[in-house]
Amino acid sequence: MAALVAGGMTLQGAQTALAYAPGELVHAGRLLYENRLNLIKDFPDPEILAEKERRAGFWYSGPRNDDVVWPTLKSRLLEELPEAAVDGVDAASSKVIGLGSPPGKESIKTRGLVLGYVQSGKTTNFMSVVAKAADVGYRLIIVLTGTTENLRTQTQDRINDYLIKPCNSIWNPLTSVDLDFSMTTPADAILSNTSMRSIAVVKKNPARLRRLHKWIKTASVTTRQNCPILIIDDEADQASIDVGTKRQSTINGLIRDLLSNPKAAYIAYTATPFANLLIDPSVEHDLYPRDFIVDLPRPDNYFGAERIFGQLEGESLEDSVDDGLDVVRLISESEVDGVRPPRNKTLLEQWSPEVPDAMDAAIRWFLLATAARRLRAGKVAHSSMLIHTSMLAGAHEKTAEAVVDHLDGLRAGLVNEAPAAFDIFRDLWDSESARVTADSFGNQPIAFDDLMPHLIETARASKVIVDNYQSNDRLEYDKDHPQTAIVIGGNTLSRGLTLEGLTSSYFVRASSAYDTLLQMGRWFGYRVGYEDLIRIWMSSELKSWFFMLSVVEAEIRAEIQVYEAEGKTPAELPVKIRTHPQMSVTSAAKMRSAVKAQVSYSGRRVQTIMFKEDDQGWLKENITATKTLFERLISEGHDENELDASRRGFRDVSADHILNLLASYQVHEAAKSIDKDAIRRYIEKERAEGDLKRWDVVLMEPYNGEEELDLGLKGKVRLLRRKKMYIPSDDGTANLKAIASTSDRVADLGVDLDFLRKSLNLKSTDKITDRQLLQFRQLRQTERTGLLCIYPIGKESDPDPGKSAQGPVENRRVPLSAAADVIGLCFMFPDSRNPRSAVDYIAAKVDAEYLEALEEELEAADKLDEAKAAEDELVTA
């Protein structure tokens, strides 16, 4: 019965087709089939956003007894992963297959998206999908990798190892580790063979995609009509999407040509879906995931942005906020300028970089951490360091020369047992081991004296590899020959390429695009057994950007979960994602140097977190603006105790007062997430539609405190204490990271956290989400009322004075020391009922010279590969 459904029949049709068999047997078969569906759904499912009809018609009942490829792959995975993890991969891949189309269907035009995490096992998931697709009858499987040969080779090598070699009797590989697609055998002879499964691992490169498309077209109409094709697009937000450049328009067109075949399914895989969700869903033949979006669960032992850089806010005003692990070390601005190469080609040729202080520390730490891993494990394993200062290939060789010379000097000092050389290593080991202790992860603490012999061995084994499209080096991680490598590169290292055993990263390349930044985070992933040893050196600017990344990423996934719960379809998803204020930079970076975009504040919280700490006049203007708001409200007959809540505040305030406050309140010009003019126009548009006419205003005082400020109320206002992030700044900017808490969403309703949990049917240990609070609020209020929370913060602010002097300052918050008291604002908007309320604004500009240089690099790589493709065809002919 499962085979008939996979062949394109409905379940009832399959039962009718089996009428020749005993009725009781057919009935039992149908029950078994349906039970298997339900069993799959009982697993901890990934979150899914799927076309309603497709979800209702879920056809795949899971692996069958006569399957070959998946059972073989599953056995291999069980040798390497815990059984629970393999069960999760099994459930998720079955879900993806089932949300696609049966291979026997007359026409297949599937468009889906699987959202994973950077360096989190997406390859394992899509290999499982490939295995199950091959078992159910997809005859040609195309895996599109990134734009570089190194990434294609790495993916091909894994597919060979896990899929092709263990089941080589049914696979017909069209590519190899050494050869990208350059097939000369006629397509008819291969694609008409119903017992074989063909697979091609292909770069997203015009030369290769053009050849692949032409080759498929040589097959007869009948062959193509009967050949189900599955295209897996890894790193799908890179190169696949038409964002206006000639090259990407070409690649997008060639992928769409492949999908023009009668039976072609497309499943995109990415950890950064921003650009994918910005595709216009009304363009029928483009790559928007109209059929389904699957959000893979985050593994428990995964090191992601939130784990490293911390949470944005606590659950309540009094909660402490997790600022992440103390593993980030800052690079001075002068050093950043020194290691970034000039973009001018003539100046680049004359450029002679050195190894400055922070890079020296990062290299030394790599040697120490690798030695510690060897001692702990009692064996040598892959260990890598990342140096990422530019995407320009010409800069990598010059940087590598400097690193090689520096490494030779370090090696000589250790081999010669120079006391001064060991002292520097000892001091670094002792200081870093104290900042992130081995005990905190249950790992074995190591004394430096025990480390010394392994340190010398590690230094001798270490080599420097340049990884870019021009490089002859190949970053290979052979199980039998462990690598100890310092890897220097650009585009290849920021897209998909796995750096095994990454411990130390030196990272200064700047990009204002969130998806690019996330992909650059090669340090995300699994670090079992050496969690305490990872370190990242980066600029303070990059660190501040990464603070926001974890929030943006979490909100994207939260949106998918909300739409799943509400039964929405992928076609409805972009309404929120496209207009998210933090997405503006991404869309600008993907398209052009400046772009007019749209922003909607529907359901959003927008808060001020950046303040001019040293500018007394600027800070006092905000105090005056707040005091003026309160005085105007009181003069109109409002009372400061109008709320049911224990806090002071005003109910049913006219939107005019909010707009007046916006006009006089000063917002830091560097703030990316708050645009006063856009907020004003959004409020006006909502008000014209009958919403946001009235607001509640809450003064977020602490329940106790000695410091006070006169804001024109009956009694002076108690002041909050907030520390600022340690981000050195020449302009006196204090970044508080967050001033609002999750529970502030209902600060005007007079409910506590215990009541909220009971109302939301949550356990005492469950974290309350902003979306849950928004829904609770909207159930309690008949009108779409806005909420403004005002946060008075003391100028000399240190919530934990006793802890201020403890530990290194670099990865901690430090006391706020402002020229005047600080007034922070958080605007909390209800869900909008009015799609016309989105407002235009100009998104951030992107360095046009940078984008042009990137295009030049990619075009140069394409030309090299075009020549290689022609050569490969001669070899295989």
Image (cartoon, rainbow, N blue to C red):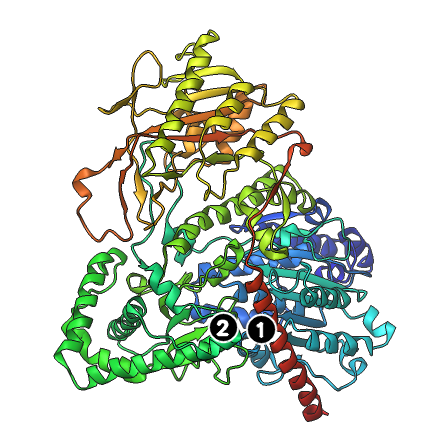
**Image quarter of residue 194:** bottom right
Residue 746, how many percent across, how many down? 45, 25
Residue 279 relative to residue 854: left or right: right
Q: Is residue 587 above or below residue 142?
A: above
Residue at image location 56% in from the left, 52% down from the top: 845
Question: Which disc number belongs to residue 171?
Answer: none
Spot occupied by residue 751 in the image (x, y as percentages of width and height): 41, 22
Q: Nearer the viewer, residue 205 or 188?
A: 205
What is the quadrant of residue 450 in the picture? bottom left
What residue is pinned by disc 1? 857
Instruction: Tell me, yes or no, if residue 467 can be seen here.
Output: no
The amino acid type, in three-letter code, at marker 2 is Arg
Residue picked out by circle 2: 76
> Where residue 424 appears, x then y in whole percent?
18, 71
Nearer to me, 390 or 555: 390
Lower sequence index among marks 1 and 2: 2
Question: Is residue 124 rendered to the left or right of residue 18?
Answer: left
Dots 1, 2 in contact, CB < 8 A: no
Which residue is outermost to the right?
Answer: 221
Q: How many marks?
A: 2
Q: Alpha-carbon neighbours of circle 1 within 10 Å: few (<14), some, or many (≥20)?
A: some
Please say if 42 is above or below 141. above
Q: Residue at x 31, y 65 (%)?
A: 529
Q: Is residue 874 visible?
A: yes
Residue in the foreground of this view, choosing between 661 and 45: 661
Examine the image and state in which quarter residue 414 appears. bottom left
- Image quarter where the C terminus lies is bottom right
Amino acid type shown at disc 1: Glu
Give the answer, above or below, for where 373 lies relative to 730. Answer: below
